[in-house]
Amino acid sequence: MSADKIIEYLVRVMIILLINPLHECAHAWAAYKLGDDTAKNEGRMTVSPLAHIDPFGALLLLFCGFGWAKPVPVNPNHFGNPRKGMMITAIAGPLSNLLAAFAGMFAFRIFFSTEILRTVFYYFTVININLCVFNMIPVPPLDGSRVLTYFLPPNAAIWFMRNQRYFYGVVMLLMVTGLLSVPLSYLSNLVFKLLLFMTGLIAP
């Protein structure tokens, strides 16, 4: 196994232990700020990996490059506006990955002359971007579905949620066959270039 591949796997472990918990904590924190303390009361408003790790999702992320942690419980009835509350709570997770990717890209520029650190922060940035883009796919149970249903007319949103298992099945089939990798890679590359540009404006 090459040195780059070893570093990539080590970064994936870092993502499992640090970033996935941050992603779920962001959901819990957003829900709490909007009036729902369900996740907080269940000890999920924390960045401790012990509170969030899903063994199967962690193994998938380690060996396949994408995965998940245990979703935090959310009670939309505690929100003043349930649809809006669910949308904001959902988007908080991918936003945490995007912010982590921005920090990783900034560090990538700072340590560009150091090969090992450059490689570490490159993979850290890329994986966070991939997780952000993947989670924004508008299909349940991914976070993007809550964003989509917020903008759909109420009847269409209800129909969408009732048939979510079919949409999820189609997405999983597209992922297994590799057909989804092309649009996801395209979007991830766009985000990578945007962060590269943005950090270039502020990096020394």
Image (cartoon, rainbow, N blue to C red):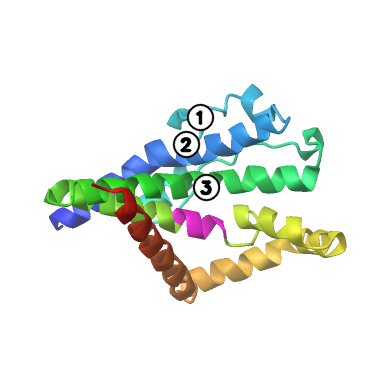
Q: Nearer the viewer, residue 171 or 126?
A: 126
Q: Report the predominant secondary structure element of the magenta stretch.
A: helix
Q: Earlier in the sequence, mark 2 or mark 3?
A: 2
Indicate yes or no whether the magenta region holds residue 133. yes
Report whether 15 appears left or right of 133: left
Q: Quadrant of the N terminus?
A: bottom left
Q: Residue at x 57, y 58 (%)?
A: 136
Report whether 57 appears left or right of 193: right
Q: CA distance from mark 2 to mark 3?
A: 13 Å
Q: Position of residue 86 (x, y in %)?
A: 71, 45
- How many marks the image carries: the answer is 3
Report whether 204 appears left or right of 186: left
Q: Please, what secondary structure does the residue beneath circle 1 have? A: helix
Q: Are marks 1 and 3 in contact (CB under 8 Å)?
A: no
Q: Position of residue 21 (x, y in %)?
A: 47, 36
Q: Nearer the viewer, residue 174 or 75?
A: 75
Q: Quadrant of residue 197?
A: bottom left
Q: CA distance from mark 1 to mark 3?
A: 20 Å
Q: Position of residue 194 (x, y in %)?
A: 40, 61
Indicate yes or no whether the magenta region holds residue 20. no
Q: Amino acid at mark 2?
A: Pro
Residue at the disc numbered 3? 95
Q: Which residue is at the far right?
A: 155
Residue at the disc numbered 1? 51
Magenta-highlighted residues: 131-136
Residue at the disc numbered 2? 21
